[in-house]
Image: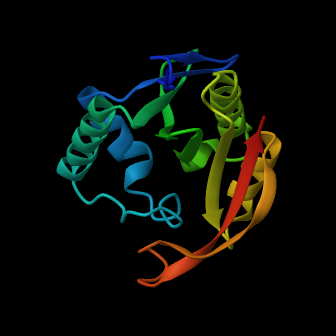
Amino acid sequence: MTLSYIPPNQFLTLRLRLRPTATSDAEAIFKTYATDSKVTRYLSWHPHTSLQDTLEFLARCDRARALGTDFAYVIEDREDGSILGMVEVRVQHHAVEYAYVLRRDKWGQGIMTEALSELADNALAHPAIWRVYALCDTENPASARVMMKAGMVHEGVRRRHAVYPNISPEPRDGLIYAKVR
């Protein structure tokens, strides 16, 4: 019998609520971080130039969720419901990969560490999951700190791992961090 991991529909932490993306999130995502060139610097996509870009992105998130392998969550402030960022949970057999983004005015407050810790603990509690991990560009120490604070251990450098089009059209090296059971 094969056990597969499907993350819960919602995660709650002390300060945060993580829930599936919705089309109604488009305007807030567009205004708070999707157009910010500093926020998107180390991401695999260019800053959005129109609300339509954000709507198309959210439609891709919905399609991936329906396939059952990638699960995008909006990160909300539990007090006021404002959108702080997003995290994507990518289920890969016995492992789960995370990718995340946080609006700039919330950097340095432990928000992403709180979200990532909750997600990782939930996945590793499932009998089918043995490894959780994330990657960041070698020149993105803030993201590396998030992973370390979430209990992940630096495993090495993946050479020519990903293209970050806001930096270069060529694949760049990435730092990989993981937590295993």
Q: How many marks?
A: 0
Residue 181 visible, this orientation: yes
Image position of 37 (left or right of 161): left
Quadrant into which the C terminus falls:
top right
**In front of the other: 131 or 75:** 131
User: What colouring does the structure picture have?
Assistant: rainbow
Among the 4 quarters of the image, the one containing residue 137 = bottom right
In this view, 121 is above or below 47: above
Could you tell me which residue is drawn at 74 percent across and 37 percent down? 110
Residue 102 visible, this orientation: no
Could you tell me which residue is drawn at 74 percent across and 63 percent down? 141
Could you tell me which residue is drawn at 50 percent across and 23 percent down? 7
**In front of the other: 81 or 128:** 128
Residue extending farthest to the left is: 52
Could you tell me which residue is drawn at 78 percent across and 53 percent down? 145
Residue extending farthest to the front is: 1
Q: Position of residue 94 (x, y in %)?
A: 58, 38
Q: Position of residue 142 (x, y in %)?
A: 72, 57
Image position of 174 (left or right of 72): right
Q: Position of residue 157 (x, y in %)?
A: 71, 71
Q: Position of residue 8 (x, y in %)?
A: 50, 17
**In front of the other: 181 or 134:** 181
Among the 4 quarters of the image, the one containing residue 174 = bottom right
Image position of 29 (left or right of 106): left
